[in-house]
Image (spheres, rainbow, N blue to C red):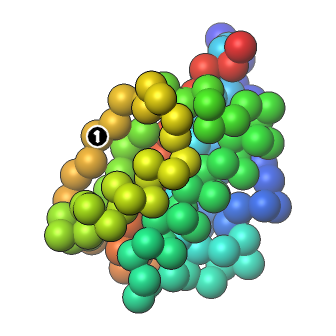
Amino acid sequence: MPRTPIVTDAAPAAIGPYSQGMRSGSLVFTSGQLPATADGNLITDDIPAAARQSLENVRAVLMAAGVSLDHVVKVTVFLRDMTDFAAVNEVYATYFGDPAPTRSCVQVARLPKDAPLEIEAIAVRP
């Protein structure tokens, strides 16, 4: 099945050899989105703001692929510190309706640029 890279100026550019997103058939995959603005300013000191920015970046990549957060079926959240779980959940709940997509949330030793979190998603195109 052919793969189509997804590129948008509305989210930060990739900081390594990967695509912001990829479409294959009806599936859309976002790369992990750090809490950085489109011009690369990283949010590190405010977890709710960081979660919002990462989710806005996920939304931007999905929109570039022609889908929305309503099409997301799976999300993975990577946290530097699991004590941020509740704060991230509060923000996360405002982005996804009912039923919410499936999700995994894990604490990791370190993220690129020492970011406090990273979020990726998988969506299905109608």
Quarter occupied by residue 38 = bottom right
In the displayed orientation, state which residue is furthest to the bottom: 45
Which residue: 60% across, 50% down? 58
Residue 3 x %, y %: 69, 25
Q: How many marks?
A: 1
Nearer to us in this view, 1 or 98: 98
Left or right: 53, with 92 as reference point: right
Residue 90 x %, y %: 38, 59
Quarter occupied by residue 103 = top left
| 39 versus 102 height, above or below | below
Which residue: 57% across, 42% down? 30
The image quadrant where one finds the C terminus is top right
**Which residue in the structure is indicated by mark 1?**
104
Which residue: 54% across, 65% down? 52
* Residue type pointed to by label 1: Ser
The image quadrant where one finds the N terminus is top right
Asked if residue 22 shows in the view, the reply is: no
Asked if residue 92 shows in the view, the reply is: yes
Residue 121 x %, y %: 50, 39
Badge 1 density bin: few <14, some 14–19, many ≥20, Cα 10 Å: few
Quarter occupied by residue 45 = bottom left
Q: Secondary structure at mark 1?
A: strand
| 87 versus 44 height, above or below | above
Left or right: 76, with 5 as reference point: left
Which residue: 51% across, 51% down? 94
Residue 62 x %, y %: 69, 40
Nearer to us in this view, 88 or 104: 88
